[in-house]
């Protein structure tokens, strides 16, 4: 009898439950509770919806005054907002987008093309504005990677861009924030793995993309099947014949995204917290990269190792024919506490080393973001009335500052002067 057999026999004789059965039962119990929570939070269809926006919020998003929106509404021009108690006007995100297009059409009719472009910000392919693919990455957990990615994607959609969010993390936290429970809502080939796998079951990414409750924001969800790419890639490389481009893992995500490129202006990829084949393929598909960094010395030391490993692996990919020309690479300081002296020192240390490659605005740690997360929501989804004004305003100011800075980088890449 082997040592393993002796341990198994002793476990059975002692009446102990095998670890895999205990873990499986815990998984079933947790999944059932999460499902019940979703049904309680988002009745009646158990699916998330997006709140309406006040006329003031709508005016700020479009870039006009609230008074001007009132004039349009009274004149019956543009989309008809929902009118609540006291005559208050509320706009859905689709209404706001329709309003942008209406105002752009009015501006074009007057020959003001620049004004029209300020309302509808879609990229102009004829002017050479290429699809922006932004990977948000770090291989240390707790760096605020998913939080940064989801708020960036939602901010850009609210600003009027056509956005595709891609969950490349097998843990599927980004998908959960969009209302998906992977083990219940997804089956085989429902993630980007279905579009990048090496066998005959590969399918078009267009068939995998899902609409979300956010207007102009679609999702490629994730689940545990993404891990299969880490296992199947070594086999594909080992069996690769000379000249077989199909087995080159670093082209897979890029090729998949090309199938839907005409439908979007920006793709935001939430990378897994590890430097595997998935992350490398995402980086090779990227035009820009955001590296999230928590300003603690251990996290910065970990980032040093991440950068060394990334450099080494990408150099191998480049020598094999991969394209690695980023429009920009930026470090984002996350979970930043302004009154924490050591954190301020670490942030200053990073700025002294990397200069303007560190985003000027940090992502401030906020209880408002954490509280919103309790109901699987982001700060852009919940109303100001749910928090104390100071807490909400500080968190929103931080989010908008970070995401606006990234937006300006995108516009600069496209050659716009906005």
Image: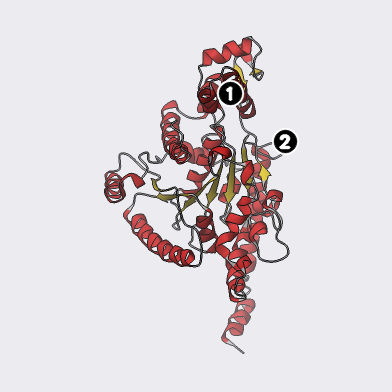
Viewer-side label of 2, 1: 1
At a point 65% along the width and 14% down the height, the residue shown is: 77
Question: Percent x, y for residue 224?
Answer: 62, 59
Mark yes or no: residue 272 visible: no
Q: Is residue 51 visible?
A: yes
Total count of labels: 2
Q: How is the image coloured?
A: secondary structure
- Closer-to-camera residue (81/44): 81
56 with respect to 336 (left or right): right
Q: Position of residue 302 (x, y in %)?
A: 37, 59
Res 255 → quadrant: bottom right
Q: Circles 2 and 1: CB distance less than 8 Å? A: no
Q: Quadrant of the N terminus?
A: bottom right
Which residue, given by chain and number where applicable, does mark 1 sit on? Answer: 104
Residue 381 at x, y = what percent?
A: 56, 34
Q: Nearer the viewer, residue 4 or 400?
A: 400
Residue 44 disc label: 2
Point out the residue furthest to the bottom here: 1
Q: Assess disc 1: are there few (<14), some (14-19) or many (≥20) residues with their C-alpha within 10 Å of its C-alpha.
A: many
Q: CA distance from mark 2 to mark 1?
A: 37 Å
Helix, strand or loop at label 2? It is loop
Secondary structure of residue under mark 1: helix
Position in image of residue 161 (x %, y %): 56, 35
């Amino acid at each position: 009898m082997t040592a393993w057999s002796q341990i198994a026999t002793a476990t059975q004789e002692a009446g102990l439950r095998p670890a895999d059965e205990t873990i499986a039962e815990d998984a079933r119990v947790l999944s059932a509770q999460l499902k019940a929570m979703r049904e309680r939070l988002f009745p009646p269809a158990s699916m998330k919806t997006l709140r309406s926006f006040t006329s003031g919020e709508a005016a700020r998003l479009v870039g006009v005054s609230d008074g001007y929106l009132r004039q349009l509404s009274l004149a019956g021009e543009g989309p008809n907002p929902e009118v609540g108690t006291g005559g208050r006007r509320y706009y859905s995100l689709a209404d706001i987008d329709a309003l942008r297009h209406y105002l752009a059409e009015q501006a074009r009719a007057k020959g003001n093309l620049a004004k029209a472009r300020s309302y509808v910000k879609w990229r102009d392919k004829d002017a050479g504005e290429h699809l922006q693919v932004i990977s948000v990455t770090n291989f240390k957990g707790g760096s605020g990677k998913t939080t940064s990615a989801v708020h960036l994607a939602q901010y850009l959609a609210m600003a009027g861009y056509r956005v595709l969010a891609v969950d490349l993390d097998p843990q599927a936290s980004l998908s959960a924030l969009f209302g998906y429970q992977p083990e219940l809502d997804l089956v085989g080939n429902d993630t980007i793995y279905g579009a990048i796998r090496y066998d005959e079951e590969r399918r078009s990414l267009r068939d995998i993309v899902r609409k979300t409750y956010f207007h102009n924001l679609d999702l490629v969800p994730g689940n545990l099947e993404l891990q299969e790419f880490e296992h199947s890639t070594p086999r594909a490389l080992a069996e690769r014949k000379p000249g077989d481009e199909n087995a080159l893992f670093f082209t897979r995500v890029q090729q998949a995204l090309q199938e839907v490129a005409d439908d979007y202006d920006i793709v935001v990829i939430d990378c897994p917290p590890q430097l595997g084949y998935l992350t490398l393929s995402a980086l090779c598909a990227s035009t820009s990269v955001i590296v999230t960094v928590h300003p603690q010395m251990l996290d910065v030391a970990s980032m040093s190792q991440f950068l060394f490993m990334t450099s080494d692996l990408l150099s191998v990919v480049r020598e094999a024919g991969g394209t690695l020309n980023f429009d920009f690479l930026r470090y984002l300081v996350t979970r930043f506490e302004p009154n924490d002296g050591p954190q301020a020192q670490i942030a200053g240390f990073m700025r002294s080393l990397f200069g303007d490659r560190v985003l000027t605005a940090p992502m401030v740690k906020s209880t408002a973001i954490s509280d919103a997360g309790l109901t699987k929501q982001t700060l852009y989804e919940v109303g100001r009335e749910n928090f104390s004004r100071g807490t909400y305003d500080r968190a929103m100011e931080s989010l908008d500052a970070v995401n606006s800075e990234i937006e300006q980088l995108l516009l600069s890449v496209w050659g716009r002067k906005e």
